[in-house]
Amino acid sequence: MSDKKKKAAEHSPEASDDRRLERQNMVKYQLAAEGIYDQAVLKSMGKVPRHRFVLEEMQSLAYEAVPLPITNGQTISQPIVVAMMTQALELKKEDKVLEIGTGSGYAAAVLSLIVQKVYSVERFAELAKTAQVRFRELHYDNIEVKVADGTLGWPEKAPFDAIVVTAAAPKVPESLLAQLAPGGRLIIPVGTRWSQELILVRRGQEGGFTSETLEPVRFVPLVGAEGWSEE
């Protein structure tokens, strides 16, 4: 092995990782066994060290089939939900993806191993800063984060091949639809503050939109100009 490759291996997220078996079991028994078939998604989630994206006192639960609390009253979704939403986007290597709700950074890390570029918007500066530190430490170099109102997207970087929203909206924000490229896909929880359904929206090559309902979910509210108010 060349010195360059050896150095890269030493600094990879998997180096000195004693949780690999837990991660493999998560992929096998929680994801593949529950219908996740996209090999890129399974491979990515088998690599990203989820325990590095949760609170230290929660690390023993990092690979369990449960959502976990993080700071600022937010959560990290259970692994099957991350996998299901990522798979539904039908991602390709050359895709440019917008994520609304960086949170801990875990979902963006998963996306980053599948696509060319990830742009992530977070409304809490503390969460954005912590996620960026994790990305640098783990060498996820194709993720860009900014602090802003996620309901308005990231128009300067549009259009996007896929958009994933990790908080629940009362309706699909028009700004996000406008930033979706022809042929693009958007997945978002839509409903009340307490109960939602995952909606997958596709933009046709001619600009029209179609949508389908996937399944019931429960996410934290999407707060912003085209989402819920602070109250």
Image (tube, rainbow, N blue to C red):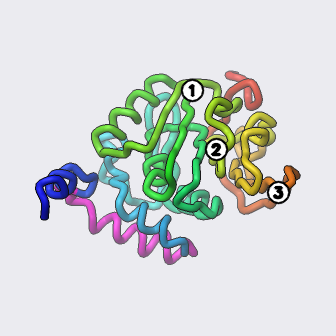
Tell me the number on the disc at residue 165: 2
Report, in whole angstroms, how far the alpha carbon at label 1 lies from the one at label 3.
Answer: 30 Å
In the displayed structure, would residue 68 be above or below residue 126?
below
Which kind of residue does numbered mark 3 sit on? Gly
Indicate left or right for 83 with 206 as reference: left
Q: Which residues are magenta?
A: 15-36
Report, in whole angstroms, how far the alpha carbon at label 2 lies from the one at label 1.
Answer: 13 Å
* Lower sequence index among marks 1 and 3: 1
Tell me the number on the disc at residue 5: none
* Near-viewer residue (140 or 21): 140
Return the residue at label 3. 204
Q: Are marks 1 and 3 in contact (CB under 8 Å)?
A: no
Return the residue at label 1. 123
In the displayed structure, would residue 54 be above or below residue 222?
below
* Lower sequence index among marks 3 and 2: 2
Indicate left or right for 41 with 26 as reference: right
Q: Main secondary structure of the magenta part?
A: helix
**Residue at position x 38%, y 43% from top?**
141
Q: Quadrant of residue 212?
A: bottom right
Quarter in which the N terminus is drawn:
bottom left
**Residue 72: percent from left, percent from top:** 49, 28
Report, in whole angstroms, how far the alpha carbon at label 3 lies from the one at label 2.
Answer: 20 Å
**Residue 159: percent from left, percent from top:** 68, 42
Q: Residues within 10 Å of mark 2 (few under 14, many from 20)?
A: many
